[in-house]
Image (cartoon, helix red, strand yellow):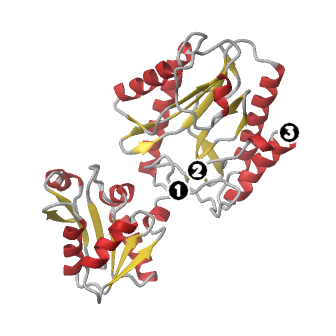
Amino acid sequence: MAQPSRIDAVRAVMRERNLDALLVTNRDNVGWLSGFTGSSGFVVVTGDRAIFATDSRYTEQAKTQCPGFDLTKLATSAPEEVTTLLADLKAANIGFEADHLTVRMHEVYRAALPPQIAFTPTTGIVDTLRLVKDAGEIRLIEEAVALADRTFDHILPSLAPGAVERDIMLEMEWFMRKKGADVAFDTIVASGPRSALPHGRAADRVLQTGDFVTLDFGARLQGYCSDITRTVVLGEPTAEQRKVYGTVLAALEKALVAVRPGASGKDVDAIARDYINEAGYGDYFGHGLGHSLGRAVHDGPGFSVRSELTLAEGMVLTLEPGIYIPGWGGVRIEHDIVVENNGTRILDISPIDLIAR
């Protein structure tokens, strides 16, 4: 169910930017504002109206999910239909989500709107408001994380020489779906030398003794996502495997200590990155330390060398340092965390110490 406070927050930003109306097209932003869970719908916010528009496929659903909105039934969800609605508002300056509207769709909207109406690109209005989660959102993320933990417990006994990456992936995704969830993203299962691929999709490779096996997975449950990564080793780990794993784990723990309201995403990233660099593995950690988490897996900015994010209480993010050595293998360990007034709280409980199977 939509919350009036969210619409009010959007209106406050609209006033700052001199917008008479805002067209919201991004699916996650639409859902956050309206409560709608379907795949095609639009929100239009004005100074005194909150409009939800969709076609006949979803009008009955919208009546249930979008209380408090003026419901508009579109003949189709084509841009021409939406621009008719916008033109009828008599608004002088209508904002649109520049990050979520293609050039082609912008051309269609612009051509269909009367020339006297300004159609203004905007960025970060709803997306920025979504960065801080309320208690209800955090509870839903906790439930999605708990399912990810159960999935790891379920699959751990299957990680053994002779197993196939693709079979492991399918079992993990089937387990989450049986529990009422969707998968938050394509499950990553990467073993042996393939564990050096940060986003290595499951293949037909057969697991072997001595392999690192990296599992990166998450559930989307009731509209909110989890995203955790664990790396295990098959058999007795070598000294180098212990060193690499220990370096990633220490980098994660050092970054956790630095997470608190007011901290800089860039500074937290640097703590983990500098530690990995000092250990001699700096060339093998190329991605950001983490990202915001919520209705989308990548729900906004997070920790990176270019991050401009300042942490605030209620933000939910991932922390996921890694080391990836081509031809040898890699390690990533990932927590889902919520920023609280006294620091951070880890949401996942799956073990992070090196597991040897």
- The label shown at residue 300 is 1
Q: Is 339 placed above or below 248 here? A: below
Can residue 50 be seen in this snapshot? yes
Check disc 3 and give the amino acid type. Ala
Q: Position of residue 133 (x, y in %)?
A: 48, 54
- The label shown at residue 106 is none
Please give left or right for residue 50 compared with residue 317 in the image.
left
- Mark 1 residue element: loop
Query: Alpha-carbon distance for marks 1 and 2?
Result: 6 Å
- Mark 3 residue element: loop
Sequence-wise, the earlier of marks 2 and 3 is 3
Sequence-wise, the earlier of marks 1 and 3 is 3
Q: Quadrant of the N terminus?
A: bottom left
The residue that appears at 71% across and 40% down in the rendered structure is: 252
Q: Which residue is mark 3?
A: 279
- Local packing at callout 3 (Cα closer than 10 Å; few below 14, some 14-19, many 20+) is few
Please give left or right for residue 142 compared with residue 197 in the image.
left
